Amino acid sequence: MMKSYQVSKDGFYGEFGGAYVPESLSCAMNGLRTAYLEILESDDFRKEYHALLKDYVGRPSPLYHAERMSRKYGCRLYLKREDLNHTGAHKINNAIGQLLLARRLGKKRIIAETGAGQHGVAVATVCALMDMPCRIYMGAIDVERQRVNVERMRMLGAEVCPVCSGGSALTEAVDVAIADWCEHPDDTFYVIGSAVGPHPYPDMVARLQSVISKEIKEQLMEHEGRDYPDYLMACVGGGSNAAGTIYHYLDDTRVKIVLGEAGGHGAESGETAATMSCGTPGIIHGSRTLVMQDDKGHVMEPYSISAGLDYPGVGPLHAHLSQTRRAEIISVNDDEALRAAFELTRMEGIIPALESSHALAMLPKMKFRPDDVVVLTVSGRGDKDIETYLAKRNEIEV
Ligand SMILES: *Cc1c(COP(=O)(O)O)cnc(C)c1O
């Protein structure tokens, strides 16, 4: 019972996970797999990691009791403010951890891929801090959609490489990043930005983000006199902010887990990124998980208004939580997310990222009791999405 939702020794969560990588990477992957736990748990690593989280990122991020929203939704709603981190989202927690790990493995060059640009900015930021050369792959469409983040990465000293194959989005950027790594497995570290990819990445990323739920425990104790909520809510792209939010509560069945994925124009519409609602088991980017694919196993092009959720796969942990019903999965459409963004802005004075708005948009779909304690993670801030918000503002009644 106790360890049921943790990763197994060979990297599986139930039937999902594993490491399906090309032969040319098996040596680098073996090195990582045998080393990561010992490094992550060493005193030396923990000291350096937590010092940077505190003084560079600005942790702990606040747990804010949102009173007006609590009244509206009939519960005690707390927002976990990852939007207040340096670089504006939770991704920096992971980027710092993986860079510290890369250094300890003697790697000299960093590569990464990015969708919304948030992971790219986090990696470029930490590479500047640690004086490491850095190349970021990004779909050509995302380069267009996220201009400001591209310029931030370049200003930080990263080389940004637009990828023009296929749908020119995150999926293709991941393919090219993997190809780069296959060519340079010895000196290069591939920083994956979400709880996806071959083992041990999903577990490593979940552990590096688990600082979120560790803080939630302490902060709830302070606010509520008990260290667990009734509900944990988060959005899921690949699943890293959600994994961090739930990590220390996975085996605590008092806590209900509710995850929001991107419905796009609707899970049934064909224009969607609702992988857990629409996907079937398959292998994508090195792990067995739920994938949006046709009968022949061709990966479908995902769609969401949010570049950070626009991915046809999902982390293997989340596929497992969905399949075992440990987590309730709700598909949130573009218009619902937009409405939620305007609502939080007007009611609490917080402009959330479009991704985070997918978590907020689940609130009207819930049935809470008045004394339910609900913790919802605001994964990032909305500065990067202002143009979208302005363009859509007239379509949304606030
Ligand atoms: C990247 C991103 C996400 C989605 O990624 P996860 O790995 O699912 O957390 C969510 N919110 C923000 C603000 C992001 O930048």
Image (tube, helix red, strand yellow):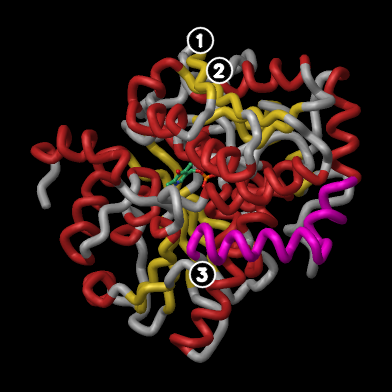
- The residue tagged 1 is 166
Q: Does 277 sit left or right of 343 as displayed?
A: right
**Label 3 – label 1 distance at C-alpha:** 40 Å
Q: Which one is in front, 113 or 172?
A: 113
- Element class at badge 1: loop
Query: Which amino acid, mark 1?
Result: Gly
Quarter of the N terminus within the rendering: bottom right
Measuring 64% from the left and 21% from the top, which residue is drawn there?
Answer: 177
Query: Which amino acid, mark 3?
Result: Pro
Mark 3 or mark 1: name the one nearer the start of the chain. Answer: 3
**Label 3 – label 2 distance at C-alpha:** 35 Å
Tell me the crowding category of disc 2: few under 14, some 14 to 19, or many 20 or more residues within 10 angstroms, Cα based. Answer: many
Point out the stretch of residues depicted in magenta: 35-58
Is 44 contained in the magenta span?
Answer: yes
Mark 3 or mark 2: name the one nearer the start of the chain. Answer: 3
- The residue tagged 3 is 60
Query: Which amino acid, mark 2?
Result: Glu
CB-based contact (under 8 Å), mark 2 and mark 1: yes
Q: Position of residue 201 (x, y in %)?
A: 72, 42
**Label 2 – label 1 distance at C-alpha:** 7 Å
